[in-house]
Amino acid sequence: MLRSSTICSFATRLLGLTIFISILVAVVFPSPQLSPPNTSETCVQPPLDNCSFYADCLETRYHCGPTGYPLGYGQKYCDAFQVARKTLSAEGQAWMVRTMHCLQLALVDDALGTGPNATRTCAALEDKAFGTHARCYVQSGVCRLPVEDWEAILEIVHFKTLFDSWDALKASLGAGTECLEFFVFLGKKTIDQW
Ligand SMILES: *[C@@H]1O[C@H](CO)[C@@H](O)[C@H](O)[C@H]1NC(C)=O
Ligand SMILES: *[C@@H]1O[C@H](CO)[C@@H](O)[C@H](O)[C@H]1NC(C)=O
């Protein structure tokens, strides 16, 4: 009798302590609130060759700040590609436009808060976005570009920024031989950097 009530009051105190700590954590480390989505045309159907999606559709909703994914990565490298466009071949420029578009389309659900996979935090958004990089690059045809374009692309965006890991990259390159040369090229570049 006595023991069970002791356990019971211990459990109550533990529960109280847990709630208290949760509230404390929430107060000290608030997670930024999501704003209502911007449902303008740019956010529903991001236009080709345009970087507005990051600031107007993602940052206005997530508020991740200057180093967060929308402004610190998405917008930054979207702008960098546009500025360095002339360093790419004609094929390379067409690839760039397709890739930038693919990366934005992959985050439309997040910008609009629609669909079961829409993220709700900056960290989750960043994870999801990095997970789309390799697929968008490969599907847009990076492996078929001339080696000069690969060099130019790596000047614009560094390998570590490009792909979160070799595993993600390998998964997207698939089993075919089409990307073998690109893979070897990246491998050499990575070794050179050390
Ligand atoms: C990108 O799209 C926005 C919104 O539709 C537009 O205001 C802007 O002029 C476009 N920027 C470029 C460089 O085309
Ligand atoms: C929504 O997106 C449009 C198009 O890019 C932009 O002009 C507008 O400022 C955005 N609205 C808000 C509230 O951010």
Image: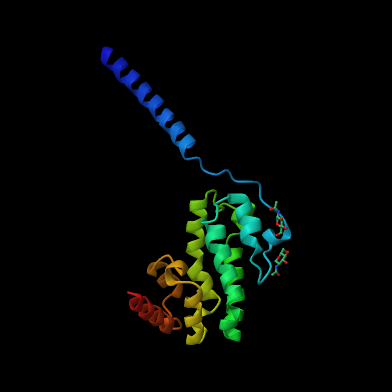
Please tell me which residue is depicted at 58% across the width and 63% down the height of the picture: 75
Q: Is residue 152 visible?
A: yes
89 vs 19, left or right, is: right
**132 and 20: which is toward the camera:** 20
* Total number of numbered discs in the rendering: 0
Ligand 2 resides in the quarter of the picture at: bottom right
Q: Position of residue 3 (x, y in %)?
A: 26, 16
Which residue lies most toward the left here? 3
Quadrant of the image for the N terminus?
Answer: top left
The answer to whether 187 is drawn above or below residue 101 in the figure is below
Residue 120 drawn at (x, y percent): 55, 48
Q: Which quadrant of the view contains residue 24? A: top left
**Residue under the image location 66 percent in, 46 percent down:** 36
60 vs 160: above or below: above
Q: How is the image coloured?
A: rainbow
Judge from the rendering whether residue 131 lies leftward or rightward of residue 18; answer left or right.
right
Report the residue at 63% width, 66% height from top: 51
Query: Can residue 113 be spotted in the picture?
Result: no
Place of residue 65 in the rendered image (x, y in percent of width and height, measured from the top left): 55, 52
The one of 185 and 174 positioned closer to us in this rendering: 185
